[in-house]
Image (cartoon, rainbow, N blue to C red):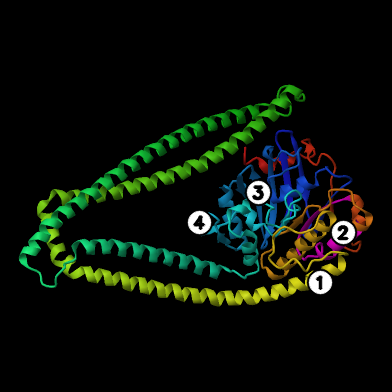
């Protein structure tokens, strides 16, 4: 993936700008801090789907629309993000965060599933997890923990960072994940069989004949006993079905209410949108009668209308997604109702037809109790044994796949140790050998010592991803220096960074103050994006054409 450019539009403060990038190293440069380097870096990964929780104080992302234009496999795509909605190639697709994550993974030809912390089941991940190895956030990634606390999103899963790197290193591949899912389904089948067995045992205890020889009087006794029990069972099932129908009808009514409310809201929003659009068009850049310029009041009105249009469109698109979801849910409830009514009809016929009940009881007494009980029990035992065999086969397959993965892990661990040794030679007075592969706990040390260690580990994992993963996503790192530091420290850190991070054969983004560029390798070719406050410029004749990129939202 190559990010070609980003367009950012602040529709509240009437600011806009486009930033174009090189396919290799891009430096966000400013004379001093607090100019907007972090805002630009965060905006790129926010648009890619990363969950950014901390923004610079003057950067109101909720009042902005972001559009990335990317190149992947010789195909171009535009990703527009407005709050929590994503628009792909204009309005070709409107997606929420979860749907967008699926789209992004399809685009990258990957499918990541890791274990949920809540139920320990394999779960689809969000875009933040997809981007985990590639983005180092200024506010969340330099807190003493390597990767593990860079996003609040990671808390949804059991062992997020390790599982994500296992996927990218192909230690845990899709085949293993598919086998794990299949194993989980079979284990669930075992539980179902066990429950059936428990139910059958209860029936056996109550109805199984105590003697091998059966007398007529005994059969008549069983008939009378079973008839009452069987009838009660059918009546109980009817009660359950009636209760389920009542609950289902109640849910359908609630869904209808919500659908009607949303439908009314959508109609009102469309009316508002149409009204605002007409007013917007009525206020021309020039007066249609005398060709005079717009008054300040007319300009402000036009700007305010555009802002309202963006908000209305965002709410309309959200409501449409919710409306469609509720309709699907209602359709499922209607289908369920049809099934329950059909089941209700069947049981009512059985209960109302006493002759049918007697025949059924007679068949149960003669066949089920004396013939089928053992047969059903045997079927359950055979089914369970067969399922256990399947599980064991799958476990062996998983073991074989993991054996291949363990070989890869050995190769990666060896490379990890090699890079660790190299880095220690380049960073004075820093001990890195205490940090083992996949150790994402808090880094020991403080101040510059901790910063050095974290920088080394982040760069190390970036190089491992670059070498051992087939997935190519741009790397982005916000500056690791927040406070004043010595020339010696900056010379060492930036020299290390330019040698091992900026040389990664991929697209790279890094933010830096202008005075620190002298510490980078001067022979390397950098694309410098020079930033001045404010980084978004007021909409004017020179840049108003950029607004056309967002007209589909209006």
Relative image position of residue 544 (x, y in whole percent): 75, 38
Q: CA distance from mark 2 to mark 1?
A: 19 Å
Graded by Cα atoms within 10 Å as few (under 14), some (14 to 19) or many (20 or more), the crowding at tag 4 reads: few
**First reached walking from the N terminus: tag 4 or tag 1:** 4
User: Mark number for residue 119?
Assistant: 4
Graded by Cα atoms within 10 Å as few (under 14), some (14 to 19) or many (20 or more), the crowding at tag 3 reads: many
Q: Which image quarter holds the C terminus?
A: top right
Q: CA distance from mark 3 to mark 1?
A: 34 Å
Residue 504 within the magenta-colored segment of the rendering? yes
Mark 4 touching mark 3, by CB under 8 A? no
Name the residue beneath numbered marker 2: 494
- In front here: 554 or 134? 134
Name the residue beneath numbered marker 3: 51
Graded by Cα atoms within 10 Å as few (under 14), some (14 to 19) or many (20 or more), the crowding at tag 1 reads: some
Residue depicted at x 47% and y 31%: 264
Residue 349 within the magenta-colored segment of the rendering? no
Q: Which image quarter holds the N terminus?
A: bottom right
Q: CA distance from mark 4 to mark 2?
A: 44 Å
Q: Is any part of residue 530 visible from this angle?
A: yes
- In front here: 315 or 551? 315
Relative image position of residue 392 (x, y in whole percent): 45, 75
Q: Which residues are magenta?
A: 490-513
**First reached walking from the N terminus: tag 2 or tag 3:** 3
Mark 4 touching mark 1, by CB under 8 A? no
Q: Nearer the viewer, mark 3 or mark 1?
A: 1
Name the residue beneath numbered marker 1: 421
Mark 4 touching mark 2, by CB under 8 A? no
Left or right of 334 on screen, residue 364: left
What is the quadrant of residue 160 in the picture? bottom right
Residue depicted at x 50% and y 77%: 396
Q: Nearer the viewer, mark 4 or mark 2?
A: 4
**First reached walking from the N terminus: tag 4 or tag 2:** 4
């Amino acid at each position: 993936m190559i990010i070609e450019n980003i367009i950012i539009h602040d529709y509240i403060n009437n600011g806009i700008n486009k930033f174009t990038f090189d396919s290799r190293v891009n430096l966000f440069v400013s004379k001093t801090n607090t100019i907007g380097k972090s805002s630009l870096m965060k905006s790129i990964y926010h648009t890619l789907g990363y969950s950014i929780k901390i923004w610079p104080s003057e950067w109101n992302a909720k009042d902005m629309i972001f559009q990335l234009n990317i190149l992947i496999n010789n195909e171009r795509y535009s990703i527009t993000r407005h709050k929590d909605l994503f628009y792909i190639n204009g309005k070709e697709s409107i997606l929420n965060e979860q749907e967008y994550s699926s789209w992004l993974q399809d685009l990258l030809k990957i499918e990541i599933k890791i274990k949920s912390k809540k139920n320990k089941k394999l779960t689809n991940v969000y875009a933040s997890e997809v981007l985990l190895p590639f983005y180092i956030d200024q506010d969340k990634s330099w807190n003493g923990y390597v990767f593990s606390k860079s996003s609040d999103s990671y808390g949804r899963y059991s062992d997020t960072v390790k599982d994500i790197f296992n996927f990218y290193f192909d230690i845990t591949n899709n085949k293993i994940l598919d086998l794990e899912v299949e194993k989980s389904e079979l284990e669930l089948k075992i539980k179902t069989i066990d429950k059936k067995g428990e139910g059958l045992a209860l029936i056996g205890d109550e109805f199984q004949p105590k003697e091998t020889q059966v007398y007529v009087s005994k059969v008549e006794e069983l008939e009378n006993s079973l008839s009452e029990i069987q009838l009660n069972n059918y009546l109980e099932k009817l009660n359950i079905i009636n209760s389920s129908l009542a609950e289902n009808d109640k849910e359908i009514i609630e869904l209808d209410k919500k659908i009607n409310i949303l439908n009314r809201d959508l109609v009102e929003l469309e009316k508002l949108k149409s009204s605002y659009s007409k007013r917007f068009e009525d206020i021309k850049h020039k007066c249609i009668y005398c060709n005079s310029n717009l008054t300040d009041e007319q300009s402000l009105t036009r700007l305010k209308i555009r802002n309202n249009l963006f908000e209305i469109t965002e709410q309309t698109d959200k409501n449409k997604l919710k409306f469609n979801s509720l309709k699907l849910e209602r359709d499922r409830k209607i289908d369920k109702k049809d099934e329950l009514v059909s089941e209700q009809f069947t049981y009512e016929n059985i209960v109302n037809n006493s002759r049918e009940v007697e025949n059924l009881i007679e068949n149960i007494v003669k066949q089920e109790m004396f013939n089928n009980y053992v047969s059903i029990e045997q079927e359950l035992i055979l089914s369970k044994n067969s399922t256990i065999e399947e599980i064991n086969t799958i476990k062996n397959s998983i073991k074989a796949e993991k054996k291949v993965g363990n070989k890869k892990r050995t190769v990666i661990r060896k490379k990890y140790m090699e890079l660790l040794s190299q880095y220690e030679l380049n960073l004075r007075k820093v001990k890195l050998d205490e940090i083992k592969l996949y150790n994402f706990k808090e880094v020991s040390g403080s101040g510059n010592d901790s910063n050095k260690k974290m920088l080394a580990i982040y760069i190390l994992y970036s190089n491992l991803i670059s070498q051992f993963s087939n997935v190519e996503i741009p790397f982005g790192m916000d500056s690791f220096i927040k406070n004043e530091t010595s020339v010696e420290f900056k010379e060492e850190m930036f020299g290390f960074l330019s040698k091992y991070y900026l040389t990664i054969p991929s697209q790279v983004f890094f933010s830096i103050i202008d005075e620190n560029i002298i510490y980078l390798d001067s022979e390397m070719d950098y694309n410098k994006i020079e930033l001045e406050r404010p980084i978004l410029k007021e909409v004017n004749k020179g840049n108003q054409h950029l607004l056309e990129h967002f007209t589909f939202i209006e």
